[in-house]
Amino acid sequence: MSGNIESTVDDLWQQFEEASQQYIATLGLNKIKYNKEVDEYLTLTREQLYSMPSTTLGEAAFLLAQYAACLQKEFNEHQVKLNWAQHNMNVRYGKVCKNYGNQYTKFEERKVMALGEDRALQLLNKMSLYASSHIKNLDMMANRVSVMQKTLSDLQYTKRRQDG
């Protein structure tokens, strides 16, 4: 029976994710991809920065802006997964928590009891923890890369003015 619950949760997630991906495609956001060229610009030293011509700085700034968009897209995808899992956990809790404890048992305790025994809740909780951990890793990274991009753009502008 647990295999059936797992496939049901997976099927529901797949349906939701397909609809979400179709929406993203209508916006053209599915075209945002990771570009390996950005790697060299993420670790530039001060000396390398000052020796780069302004056109290369502009290209690097553009690649960093693309990378920031890629990171933000990844962050958003995990946020959607987290929201979906938490919503479905709440719906499931509403259905099964009445079967645990008695009228004096706090709802939070009932939730823990249900999570300990209900396979669907366990799968949704695992999905929630997975998405949450990725969100923590990605939090503010797109902003930090955008700051790097802005710095390169400013440096490009300064070099152009100095070069005449």
Image: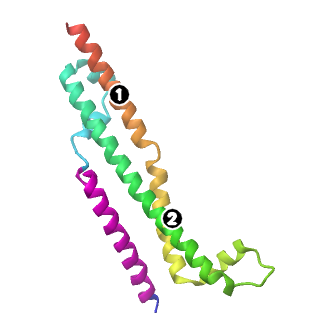
Residue 164's spot in the image, x, y percent?
19, 7
Does the magenta run of residues contain 106?
no
Mark closest to the chain's N terminus, 2 or 1: 2
Total marks placed: 2
Residue at position x 46%, y 54% from top?
135
How packed mark 2 is, by other alpha carbons closer than 10 Å (few <14, some 14-19, many 20 or more), is some
Residue matched to label 2: 129
| Amino acid type, callout 1 | Lys
Residue matched to label 1: 150
Magenta span = 3-31
| Amino acid type, callout 2 | Leu
Does the magenta run of residues contain 21?
yes
The numbered mark at residue 56 is none
From this view, report whether residue 96 is shown above or below residue 139.
below
Query: Which label sits in the foreground, 2 or 1?
Result: 1
Residue at position x 48%, y 62% from top?
82
**SS at circle 1:** helix
**Inter-mark Cα distance, 2 to 1:** 33 Å
Residue at position x 31%, y 47% from top?
70
Residue 124's spot in the image, x, y percent?
50, 73
Residue 6's spot in the image, x, y percent?
43, 82
Q: Is residue 103 left or right of residue 113?
A: right
